[in-house]
Image: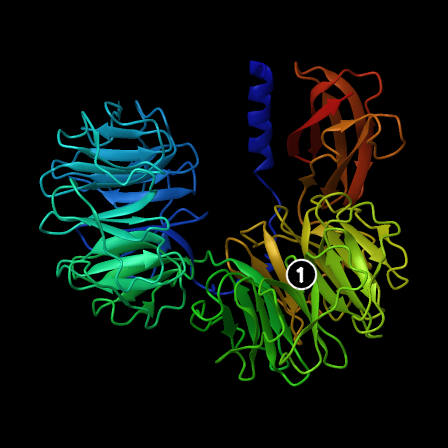
Amino acid sequence: MKPRVIFFWLVLSLAAASQSAFPQTNFWQQFNGPYGGVMYTLAADSGGFLYAATESNGIFRSTNNGAMWTPINNGLASMFINTIVAGRNGYLFAGDDDGNGVFRTLDKGETWTQVNNGLDDPRVLVLTVNAQGHLFAGTSAGVFRSLDDGESWVALSNGLPSNTYLALVVNTNGHVFAGASGRGVYRSTDNGDTWTNVGLDGATVFTMAVNANGQLFLGTSRFGIFRSLDDGDTWAQVNTGLTDPTVIVLKINSKGVIFAGTNRGGMFLSTDNGASWKTAHVGLGTDTIISLAVNAQDQIFAGSFGAGVYRSTDDGGSWTHASVGITETKVYSLATNASGQIFAGTQQAGVLRSNDQSGHWTAPNGDLIKGRVFALVVNNAGQLFAGSERSGVLRSSDNGDSWTPVNTGLTNLDVRSLAIDANGRLFAGTLGSGVFVSTNNGDGWTPSNTGLTSGIIVTLVANSQDHVFVGTLNGVFRSTDSGASWRQIITGLTNVDMRALVINQNDHIFAGTWGGDGIFRSTNNGDSWFAVPLGLTFRRVISLAIDKQGHIFAGTEGGGIFRSIDNGGNWAPLNAGLSSSFVRALTTNASGYVFAGTLSAGVFRSAQPTTSVSETATNLPVDFFLAQNYPNPFWSGATSRSAGNPATTIAFALPRLSQVTLKIFNQIGEEVATLVNQKMPAGQHETHWDATGWPSGVYFYRLQAEGFAQTKKLLLIK
């Protein structure tokens, strides 16, 4: 436990660091979506308002049947919400996955209050409410009940084993049913006081629903749908016509139509009480449905695992995308063509296109291009190729309006990277089966792995000499004979965990790695590499791009974007306006705009072309910044300067000439070292702490400069 004085000091330091006295113009602007994302739960209240809980951006609300959504997160301690339910007296409740329990609102989500008294397991997976307004919460360790609108909770353990409970429902008799992970169904006929197992032991129950007659339906992992006509005493499997046995969500409208969202089969519905099922996919641009809601008008809303929300006004006969305002689409790849169109490869939403600079995107097509789209490339004829984890390679000759799978000879359809050389040869990198080459525009593929010692191909790129480079978890390999053979080229690489490769107009190669020094540069065709991390204060680099001026942009997993204007010599953070720090894709277009694809907030575009005369020709930081020391923890033999001495590097950024102090403190607040105490110019700076003579343990380092103050923790191990 930290001493009280240290805790208080850290709180003050973090508060000071969160305030910046320096106004700045945003470099990035959100590019109108693409709208969508992962919708963990959907709910409708009695007033017709809709609520959607997203994977990482909290809760959104729609007051117009899904036409527009706005975030409503005031008071939520976490953005990770699993479940939402409407209670009595206008209350709405939300269950959190991040250890914060249950939140309650009485003003339709404008403000939220935590209500956890007695809730011993704060990871809430599902909520339901009975006719009396009593709340039941399924958690990762059991079921809890509240009789007073969430003010207090009690554990319900009489006959109910400690387990993960993913589904809860109350039937017309007021009996409560709980679906357990791997242990079937439990029933309580006395409002949760006692429980009895009523079958399906061994099954994992994901979802439950009850119709107007009190008949029960449940969806399972791998076993499809079960129905009970006798209050759960017996169960019958009802899967006729159901082609996907993993049923994630069930919902029943007022007409008795049952909707079933599945893992990879899309949507199914039954109009005969579950006796038979038929597909209900028309207009759905995804094949994974994980949440459902029905409003007072019997409109049905479907939440997907990446493509956002869909609405049906004809009992599932057709669907329209209804996600405007929800900016959580995961973008894994980006490409632009000669016409200036931008293409985004997504999770479960396929490939989306924006035709202009306003960011209007086409509808999702994740039902055709399945899974995550990791790669996009455009050939000289303007044809577009997409590589996905479940559909292999697809080709489009009409700018993404239609797609054709081109997988003949491709024995592994989990495609993670694509490249095209100057002669039009296509290279596809797979997860586990190495590289495949096509010499006929994708119509046929042959494996090309001679010399490769890793079958996991993360990234591919070709230079002006038609030499092809692959980045793997075992370093970089080069082929000078169109993929016929490969040679490992790792001289100077201190980290071989490759995540991105890019080549500039001088054929200098830049490699982004997962940790270590972050970025390496080769000026001799990969024969040798040199680390170029100066100013790169976050070093999990997962994307790279270069504009016409030769400026290099590096996207990281957790640190946003960095830019270098001197061929990698120096890096500066470039995150003003960027709301996500996980940047999986980068590209530039012919007009000089830079595009960034994020893993939680869609696509961003530079506010101005990077080739415009108004762009500041500088690599100076826009704000103060203190980086995490590296390595951390650090110990003898793992030093940043000399072998045998415990040393670590601390980097920081200054936007202007400043009087700077950087000091090290121990756990009781005693100063143990002053690393910097002087005026320093604007720019990126690094210093080192040699901890020789100091005992192992936790230390703190604190930067102060011109009203800015921030403290971070480091760990010394000997």
**Residue 544 makes an appearance in the image:** no
In this view, 399 is above or below 415: below
Residue 515 in percent (x, y) is at 72, 44
Residue 583 in percent (x, y) is at 60, 55
**66 sits to left or right of 546:** left
For the image, the number of numbered tags is 1
- Seen from the viewer's position, the closer of residues 670 and 232 is 232
Residue at point 35%, 24% (across, down): 120
Numbered disc 1: secondary structure: loop
- Seen from the viewer's position, the closer of residues 159 and 559 is 159
In this view, 430 is above or below 167: below
In the rendered structure, which amino acid carries the disc numbered 1?
A: Ser
**532 sits to left or right of 4:** right
Residue at point 73%, 43% (across, down): 654
Residue at point 51%, 53% (across, down): 600
- Seen from the viewer's position, the closer of residues 405 and 92 is 405
* Quadrant of the image containing the N terminus: top right
**556 sits to left or right of 649:** left
- Disc 1: CA contacts within 10 A as few (<14), some (14-19) or many (>=20): many
In this view, 521 is above or below 22: below
In this view, 133 is above or below 524: above
Residue 61 in percent (x, y) is at 32, 53
* Quadrant of the image containing the C terminus: top right
Q: Which residue is mark 1?
A: 433
**Residue 625 makes an appearance in the image:** yes
Residue at point 31%, 27% (across, down): 161
